[in-house]
Image: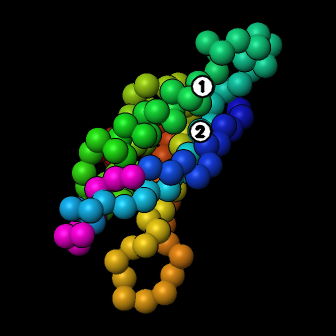
Amino acid sequence: MGIVRLNNMVFYGYHGVAEPEKILGGKIEVDAELEFDMTKVIATDHLADTIDYEKVYHLVQEVVTQSKFFLIEALAGKIIGEIFNQHPVESIRLRIRKPNAPIKGVLDNVEVEIIRRRDQMGEVA
């Protein structure tokens, strides 16, 4: 097994409960950690035998920018489901950060982390 990480992908989306988030949108940061069997690609050195991380990036970009969710937990679940549907990964650790979350207080961001194995996909809608 091995891991490919896409760190701090940044997109603009319309996710949240507060009206300004739904109307004006905001920055969404995503980290994806994809675990899969790298035995074949180590031997072949062919892109077809690995996870094409550019395709994963564009998949995440599409979900974040083309969908709307009240909660970043639901957004994370959608991204995880799409990655499992399109790529032969065994497990995914996904983090979504929302900088400038509408909270009366001082903080860098709000972050959600979800970890799923392929055999758990019945639990992610």
Q: Residues within 10 Å of mark 1 (few under 14, many from 20)?
A: many
Whole-percent x, y for residue 11 in the image? 44, 49
Whole-percent x, y for residue 94 in the image? 51, 50
Circles 2, 1 touching at the beta carbon (< 8 Å)? yes
Please report the residue visible at 56 percent of the width from the left and 34 percent of the height from the top. 90
State the quadrant of the N terminus: top right
**Disc nearer the start of the sequence (2/1):** 2
Quadrant position of residue 5: top right
Please report the residue visible at 67 percent of the width from the left and 26 percent of the height from the top. 37
Along the line of sight, which residue is nearer the eye, 5 or 90?
Answer: 5
Q: Which residue is mark 1?
A: 51
Magenta span = 12-20
Whole-percent x, y for residue 2 in the image? 71, 34
Looking at this rendering, what residue extends furthest in the bottom direction? 105
The secondary structure type at the circle numbered 2 is strand
State the quadrant of the C terminus: top left
Q: Is residue 95 above or below residue 79?
A: below
Looking at this rendering, what residue extends furthest in the front direction? 24
- Residue 112 seen in render: no
Does the magenta portion include 81?
A: no
Please report the residue visible at 39 percent of the width from the left and 73 percent of the height from the top. 101
Is 121 on the left-hand or right-hand side of 29?
A: left
Q: Label 2, label 1: how many angstroms apart (C-alpha)?
A: 9 Å
Hey, what amino acid is under mark 2? Leu
Please report the residue visible at 44 percent of the width from the left and 40 percent of the height from the top. 60
Residue 79: assigned label? none
Hey, what amino acid is under mark 1? Ile
Q: Which residue is mark 2?
A: 34
